[in-house]
Image (tube, grey):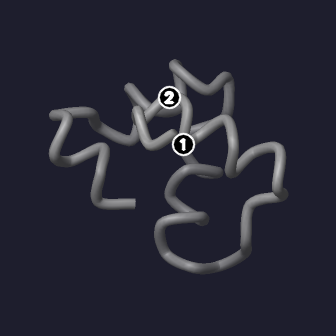
Amino acid sequence: MRQEKKLGLSQRDLAQLTGKSQSWIRDIENGRFQAKLEDQMLLRRVLGMH
């Protein structure tokens, strides 16, 4: 998820915007696990990636 960097968002910012934990955001970014489809849609919406 490099889009949040382009938007100037930190992991903490993204966590607050999505209602997820910062560790969840970090785990997704590091490829520890894949976000469910509904979470992917949420992330895309928050990041403006419709």
| For residue 32, side relative to residue 29 (left or right) | right
Q: In which image quadrant can residue 37 be found?
A: bottom right
Please name the residue shown 59% across and 65% down the image.
27
Amino acid type, callout 2:
Val
Judged from the image, the secondary structure of the residue bearing numbered disc 1 is helix
Give percent across and percent down for residue 38: 83, 44
Amino acid type, callout 1:
Arg
| For residue 25, side relative to residue 48 (left or right) | right
From the viewer's perspective, is residue 25 above or below residue 47?
A: below
For the residues labelled 2 and 1, the Cα–Cα distance comes to: 6 Å
Residue picked out by circle 2: 46
Specify few, some or many for label 1: CA neighbours under 10 Å numbering under 14, 14-19, or 20 or more: some
Please name the residue shown 83% across and 58% down the image.
36
From the viewer's perspective, is residue 23 above or below residue 50?
A: below
Classify the position of the N terminus by image quarter: bottom left
Disc 2, disc 1: CB below 8 Å? yes
Question: In the displayed image of the protein, which residue is found farthest to the front?
Answer: 50
Judged from the image, the secondary structure of the residue bearing numbered disc 2 is helix
| For residue 34, side relative to residue 16 (left or right) | right
Residue picked out by circle 1: 44
Specify few, some or many for label 2: CA neighbours under 10 Å numbering under 14, 14-19, or 20 or more: some
